[in-house]
Amino acid sequence: MTYSPPESLKPRKSPRQARSKATIDAILEATIQVLLADGARRLNTTRVAERAGVSVGTLYQYFPHKQALLYAVVQRYMNAVVEAVEACAEAYHGQPIGEATDALATTYIDAKAARPEAALALYRVSGEMDMESLANSAFSRMKAAAVRLLSSSPDAGFDNVEEDAFTVHSTVTGATRVLFENEATPEVVRDFRTQICLMCRAYLNSVKRGREK
C-alpha cells in the first residue's frame, strides 16, 4: 500500500504531461542540491526555484510551501528504496536463504549508497520534520517484502518468519543509517556490505539450528 501524505503536505497538483514531470524532477533534484550546499535551515523555495531553473510561481503550482517540498523529496527517495527492495524480493523468490538474504541486504545498502551525500541530507531532514508515518509505511512495505522472500526459500524452515524478517530488516536498516550518518567512505561501505551479509546469514542459521533441536 502506498502511503498518502497529510493534506497540508500534499502537492497542489500531480504532473500529467512529460514536460510537467520533467519540471517536478528538476525541482526535487534542485531541492537535494540546495540541501547539500546550504543545509535545511537555509533552504527556501526561492533558492530551489533558481537551482531548478524555474520561476517561484511555477514551483508554487506544485508545492504550497517549503515543508511540502521537503516532504515530497523524502517520500520520493524512500519510495525508490522500497521499490528496489520489493523488486529484489521478486527477483530472488524461491532462492536459497543465504543468497536471498545477501541480495536483500545489499540491495538496500546499494540503494542508499548510490548517493550517500543525499542519503545523509535526507536523514537529517526527516529528523527535523514529522516523517514517522511515512517511515513506518516504508518499513512495513520492506518488511513484507522480506517476509515474502524468506518464506519462499526452500531451506527456510522458520517457525515465525515475521519475527525473523523483522530482525533481519531492522538490523540492516538501522546499521545502514548509522553508517551514512557517520559519512562512511566507499571502502567502509564495501566492507560493511560484506559484514552485514555475514551477520544476517549467521542469525538466520542460528535460528534454524535452535528450532531444529
Image (cartoon, rainbow, N blue to C red):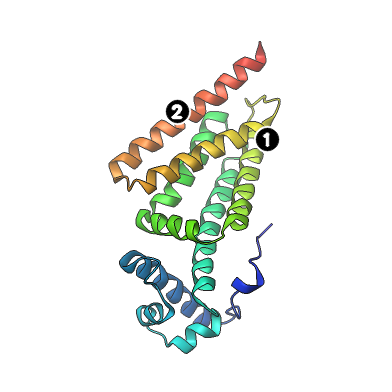
Q: Say which quadrant the C terminus sits in.
A: top right
Dividing the picture into quadrants, the one containing residue 149 is top right
Q: Are marks 1 and 2 in contact (CB under 8 Å)?
A: no
Residue 117 position (above or below residue 205): below
How crowded is the residue under tag 2: few (<14 C-alpha within 10 Å), some, or many (20+)? some
Q: Quadrant of the N terminus?
A: bottom right
* Among the 4 quarters of the image, the one containing residue 61: bottom right
Q: Nearer the viewer, mark 1 or mark 2?
A: 1
Please name the residue that numbered disc 1 is placed on.
162
Image position, residue 62 (x, y; %)? 55, 81
Q: Is residue 168 left or right of residue 28?
A: right
Amino acid carrying label 1: it is Glu
Question: Percent x, y for residue 185?
Answer: 29, 45
Depicted 97 relative to depicted 186: above or below: above
Q: Nearer the viewer, residue 129 or 210?
A: 129
Q: Which residue is mark 2?
A: 198
- The residue sitting at 47% across, 80% down in the picture is 23
- Residue furthest to the top in view is 213
Of mark 1 and mark 2, the one earlier in the sequence is 1
In the rendered image, the vertical position of residue 174 relative to residue 70, given as above or below: above
